[in-house]
Amino acid sequence: MTKRKSIDGFNILKILAALIVMFYHYQQYFNVPDRFFDFVDGPVNFHVTVEMFFMLSGFLTLHTARPDERPLPGLARKLLRYYPMAALACACALLFRSVRPAEDLGALWNLKALAGNFLLIFVGWPGFYMFGYNHVTWYLCVLTQCYLVYALLLWLRRKLGARAEDGAYWLLVSGCVIVLVNVLERFQLLQRPSFRGLESFFLGTALCVVCRRVPGRRPWLALGLFAAACALMALWPAQLRRVQIFLLYPSLILLSVWTQGLLPEKAGRVFGFFAMISFEAFLWHQPLIFFEQMLTRLTGFAIPHSDFTMLLFCAAVWALAWVMYTYVEVPLNRRVRRLTARW
């Protein structure tokens, strides 16, 4: 498996997943009429696309892990990478939703909601389930849980004396986590967002082990899995999410790894740029929706929504993402790196 810092196929998957989530939420919130393609009620579970991010996060967490990584410092570094931006996006979403609100202010401004949203515990934690000020932030709440479980497994690996590159250990514990969260969810002991995030994250770590252990490149195997996934999605719609999670997304990840280096360098740089700011696009697209809704409440003027305005909205989101990445996230990350350099 390639050791390049950036995997071109992953960059493409990040961009596509971010765009699909934007299209989904835009059509959902504005009820776009005469849709060229229906991302909300169409034949594919596009809301499940966010689980691609969990799977990529799990793969890259293990792929980039340092042999001497310690659980708690590693966990702190991961959380500090995204928490400041998540809190800022959450604050903006809360502000936009609070101006001439179309909803109960008491549901927004109460201690439980404030603590849950700004501490990233509003979803998946006992007693805190609710939708957040910025609904996209639920992904980071569940991702935090994934990183906590990963840190626990990293601690256990050190206690057992397993080697840092011990793929058998990670394959075993990833399988155990996937089975356990399915059992807990079946008995309603684990909330659905946490179950889905943990399942997809540790499928990603298992795929990382597979890519390390399988010799050579096998793109035809990945293409075969992709074709099988498409066929099963058409023939077995009742299990659409299962097919997407256990077959479609893994096939795309394997194909990305096994075709690394085939993309022309210039195209790779373009995809790399948009992938670099895809997290910001993912994080800020919903506050931008709330901002437009706030302007409509203040002015009484509602933009007629269509597929064309959806594309304009996406262009605005990527522009905002570049600004936030360049002038906010990068300076913050520099300070975080200096802060954690000795950890």
Image (cartoon, rainbow, N blue to C red):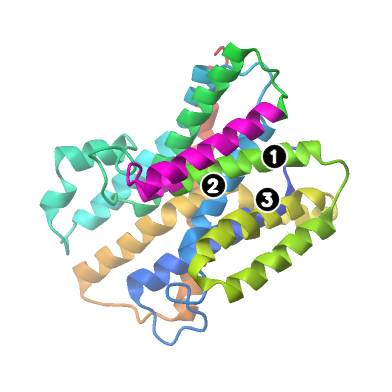
Q: Quadrant of the N terminus?
A: top right
Residue 326 visible in the snapshot: no
Q: Is residue 169 magenta?
A: yes
Q: Residues within 10 Å of mark 3 (few under 14, many from 20)?
A: many
Quadrant in the rendering for residue 116: top left
Quadrant in the rendering for residue 86: top left
Q: Which residue is mark 3?
A: 10
Q: Is residue 294 toward the left or the right of residue 251 in the image?
A: left
Which one is earlier in the sequence, the residue at label 2 or at label 1? 2
From the image, state whether disc 3 or disc 2 is nearer to you. Answer: 2
Q: Which residue is mark 2?
A: 200
Amino acid type, residue under disc 1 in the picture: Cys
Looking at the image, is 310 positioned above or below residue 206? Answer: below
Predominant SS along the magenta part: helix
Looking at the image, is 133 positioned above or below residue 100? Answer: above
* Residue 160 point in image, percent of width and height: 61, 14
Amino acid type, residue under disc 2 in the picture: Ser
Taking the spot 35% from the left edge, 77% from the top edge, the residue there is 31
Query: Are the residues tagged 3 and 2 within 8 Å (C-beta)?
Result: no
The residue nearer to you, when weighing 208 against 92, is 208
Q: Which residue is mark 1?
A: 208
CA distance for labels 3 and 2: 15 Å
Amino acid type, residue under disc 3 in the picture: Phe
Which one is earlier in the sequence, the residue at label 1 or at label 3? 3
Quadrant in the rendering for residue 244: bottom right
Q: Residues within 10 Å of mark 1 (few under 14, many from 20)?
A: many
Magenta range is: 168-195
